[in-house]
Image: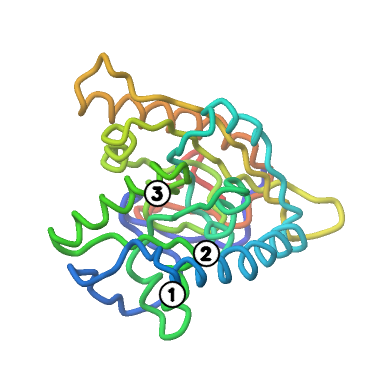
């Protein structure tokens, strides 16, 4: 895999952000409404999610990236249950759309930064598209956790990007903590992971986006809760690291700011 012409220097794999947006995030407090399932909420969700977003997501991913999903049949192994989906965070727009393609015909709800519900116009729509912003206080935290449990209980998909920050077109998997794996442990639901990879196309410079789906992984009830989280995290991380080897295109090279390029950390 040849190195990309663009070079990005980073300091911290866990916290550096290269999304390129500069949005002032609003505070997600006790007044934020996570579940919007009254008559009008259900109607707006159906309109924005099913009628507008899903067809546009399919067209964009197919036309721009020639998108393919490999392994979607594995969802049948969960037996129709709700599930948690984890993935690598490598594209501003595609990362918002791929979970919809994975989960369909079910709904996907994505845990996001507050930026995603803070934009002047789109920020009013994204909650009806499935955005679940992270809370900023304890009361909002209770509402957030209740919403997560509500959606998986309703047999929906809850999508999480454990890397937390976007590194565009990155072709390895960055380290991430096991903190977000408390959700499937507490809800006792299966876990899947997707790995977005970028692969060469003969006639186009834009790479093909190929998404590999793996799982299900289940919390090990024989372990204490904290160890269950770590075991799930390790399973997902190892699987995604292996899938990341399918990348064949390197558009950007990421180099640690010390000047030493990390082996395997190029995109």
Crowd tier of the residue under label 3, counting other residues whose Cα lies within 10 Å: few below 14, some 14–19, many 20 or above: some
Q: Which mark is residue 92?
A: 2
Of badges 2 and 3, nearer the viewer stands 3
Of mark 2 and mark 3, the one earlier in the sequence is: 2
Left/right placement of residue 77 relative to residue 218 reads right
Q: Which mark is residue 21?
A: 1
Whether tag 1 and tag 2 are in contact, CB under 8 A, the answer is yes
User: Which residue is drawn at the image coordinates 34% and 53% (left, top)?
Assistant: 258
Quadrant showing the N terminus: top right
Alpha carbon distance from label 3 to label 1: 29 Å
Crowd tier of the residue under label 1, counting other residues whose Cα lies within 10 Å: few below 14, some 14–19, many 20 or above: few
Q: Residue furthest left?
A: 138
Alpha carbon distance from label 2 to label 3: 24 Å
Quadrant of the rendered structure where residue 191 is?
top left
Alpha carbon distance from label 1 to label 2: 9 Å
User: Which residue is drawn at the image coordinates 49% and 34% (left, top)?
Assistant: 192
Of mark 1 and mark 2, the one earlier in the sequence is: 1
Left/right placement of residue 207 relative to residue 265 reads right
Local secondary structure at mark 3: helix
Of mark 3 and mark 1, the one earlier in the sequence is: 1
Quadrant of the rendered structure where residue 84 is?
top left
Q: Nearer the viewer, residue 257 or 132?
A: 132
Local secondary structure at mark 1: loop
Left/right placement of residue 222 relative to residue 57 reads left
Local secondary structure at mark 2: loop
Q: Nearer the viewer, residue 212 or 90?
A: 212
Q: Which mark is residue 151?
A: 3
Q: Which mark is residue 235?
A: none
């Amino acid at each position: 895999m040849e190195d990309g012409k663009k070079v990005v220097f980073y300091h911290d794999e866990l916290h550096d952000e290269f999304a390129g947006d500069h949005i002032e995030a609003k505070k997600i407090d006790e007044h934020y409404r996570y579940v919007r399932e009254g008559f009008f909420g259900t109607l707006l969700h159906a309109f924005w999610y099913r009628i507008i977003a899903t067809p546009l997501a399919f067209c964009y991913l197919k036309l721009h990236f020639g998108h393919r999903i490999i392994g979607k049949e594995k969802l049948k192994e969960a037996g129709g249950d709700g599930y948690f989906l984890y993935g690598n965070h490598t594209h501003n727009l595609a990362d918002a759309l791929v979970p919809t393609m994975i989960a369909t015909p079910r709904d996907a709800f994505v845990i996001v930064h507050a930026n995603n519900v803070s934009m002047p116009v789109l920020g009013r729509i994204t909650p009806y598209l499935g955005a679940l912003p992270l809370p900023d206080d304890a009361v909002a935290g209770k509402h957030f956790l209740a919403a997560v449990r509500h959606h998986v209980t309703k047999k929906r998909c809850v999508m999480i990007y454990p890397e937390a920050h976007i590194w565009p077109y990155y072709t390895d998997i960055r380290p991430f903590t096991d903190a977000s794996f408390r959700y499937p442990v507490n809800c006792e639901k299966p876990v899947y992971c997707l790995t977005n990879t970028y692969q060469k196309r003969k006639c186009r410079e834009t790479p093909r986006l190929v998404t590999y789906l793996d799982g299900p992984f289940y919390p090990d009830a024989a372990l204490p809760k904290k160890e269950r989280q770590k075991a799930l995290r390790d399973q997902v991380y190892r699987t995604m690291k292996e899938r990341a080897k399918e990348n064949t295109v390197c558009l950007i090279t990421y180099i640690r700011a010390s000047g030493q390029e990390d082996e395997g950390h190029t995109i």
